[in-house]
Image (spheres, rainbow, N blue to C red):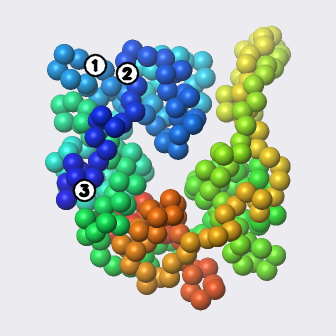
């Protein structure tokens, strides 16, 4: 199976055109679950791929307005004729959930979810069970933890989920980045910089203040409800056993619109498998 058989074609991909500004993509990235948008430049010979604009870049460079200065150029790409197994290996090794398909001109994009769809449908062979690709290291938190603290835990652990545990240490739910983003609110205001030069941004700032003399600069902070995780987590958790096949795990991810599934032995939590983990089964 080739990338062409699984990818989202150009006509169905939301892109940003050069020249353009941050406002062209900011609203889209905030409202959608995608983490980045391909940037193309229209030419007489068709659209040419130039790079990606990510949500992270927009947040880290609040004073830059031009897309050409914001886009990331050194990101992995693939071609429509590349084997899907090879594209999957690139995703895993580069930590890239979305890989532009480029062959002279921009042809589309292939995502981790596209590959999971192919595995679930049996279009891409993936032998073995989840225990061969799963991790025994599970990110957890107490279900009574305030949501802002849980968000910091996810950030420091560099994972998109946490398994919530109850007073007995048993799994009671799962919290994801999406759950947090759904209730987060951006608060805009202004703050005096004073006369000093700061060396760190505010811990909770999306568009932090850096002191540049006695001035007022705009702030854009994320406000997260200080209520316990149990009020925001999903308590109807989809699980698998260690012997569950790769294909069945992929099917459960697609049918439940989730990216990770805890692994249980009896009632005991023994590991977790994420969607990108399943891609390893295609080339190992």
Q: Which picture quadrant has residue 189?
A: top right
Q: Which residue is mark 3?
A: 84
Q: How far, Cα to Cα, is label 1 from label 3? A: 28 Å
Q: CA distance from mark 3 to mark 2?
A: 27 Å
Q: Are marks 1 and 2 in contact (CB under 8 Å)?
A: yes
- Expressed as whole percent of the image width and height from the top left, the position of residue 165 reads 73, 72
Q: Which mark is residue 42?
A: 1
Q: Quadrant of the C terminus?
A: bottom left
Rendering quarter of residue 236? bottom right
Instruction: Give the mark nearer the N terminus: 1 vs 2.
Output: 2
Disc 1 from disc 2: Cα separation: 7 Å
- Badge 3 element: helix
Where does the image place residue 96, in percent across and percent down from the top left?
A: 41, 48
Residue at numbered disc 2: 17
Q: Is residue 99 positioned above or below 104 on the image?
A: below
Residue at horizontal 72 percent and vertical 33 percent from the top: 186
Residue 191 makes an appearance in the image? yes
Rendering coords of residue 60 (x, y %): 59, 30
Q: Nearer the viewer, residue 91 or 42?
A: 42
Q: Residue at x 19, y 16 (%)?
A: 44
Snapshot quadrant of residue 61: top right
């Amino acid at each position: 199976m080739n990338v062409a058989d699984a990818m989202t074609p150009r006509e169905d991909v939301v892109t940003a055109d050069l020249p353009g500004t941050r406002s062209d993509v900011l609203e889209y990235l905030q409202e959608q679950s995608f983490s980045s948008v391909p940037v193309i430049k229209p030419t007489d010979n068709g659209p040419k791929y130039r790079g990606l604009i990510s949500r992270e870049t927009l947040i880290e460079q609040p004073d830059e307005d031009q897309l050409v200065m914001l886009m990331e150029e050194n990101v992995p790409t693939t071609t429509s004729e590349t084997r899907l197994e090879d594209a999957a290996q690139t995703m895993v090794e580069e930590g890239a959930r979305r890989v532009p398909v480029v062959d002279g001109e921009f042809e589309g994009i292939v995502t981790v979810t596209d590959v999971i769809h192919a595995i679930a449908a049996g279009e891409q062979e993936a032998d073995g069970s989840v225990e061969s690709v799963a991790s025994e290291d599970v990110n957890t938190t107490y279900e009574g933890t305030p949501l802002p603290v849980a968000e910091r835990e996810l950030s420091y652990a560099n994972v998109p989920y946490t398994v919530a545990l109850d007073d007995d240490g048993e799994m009671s739910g799962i919290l994801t980045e999406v759950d947090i983003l759904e209730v987060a609110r951006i608060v805009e205001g202004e703050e005096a910089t004073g006369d000093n030069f700061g060396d760190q941004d505010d811990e909770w700032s999306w568009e932090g203040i850096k002191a540049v003399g006695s001035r007022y600069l705009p702030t854009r902070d994320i406000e997260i409800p200080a209520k316990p995780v149990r009020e925001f987590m999903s308590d109807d958790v989809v699980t698998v056993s260690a012997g569950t096949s790769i294909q069945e795990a992929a099917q459960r991810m697609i049918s439940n619109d989730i990216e990770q599934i805890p692994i249980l032995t009896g009632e005991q939590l023994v590991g977790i498998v994420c969607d990108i983990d399943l891609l390893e089964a295609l080339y190992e």
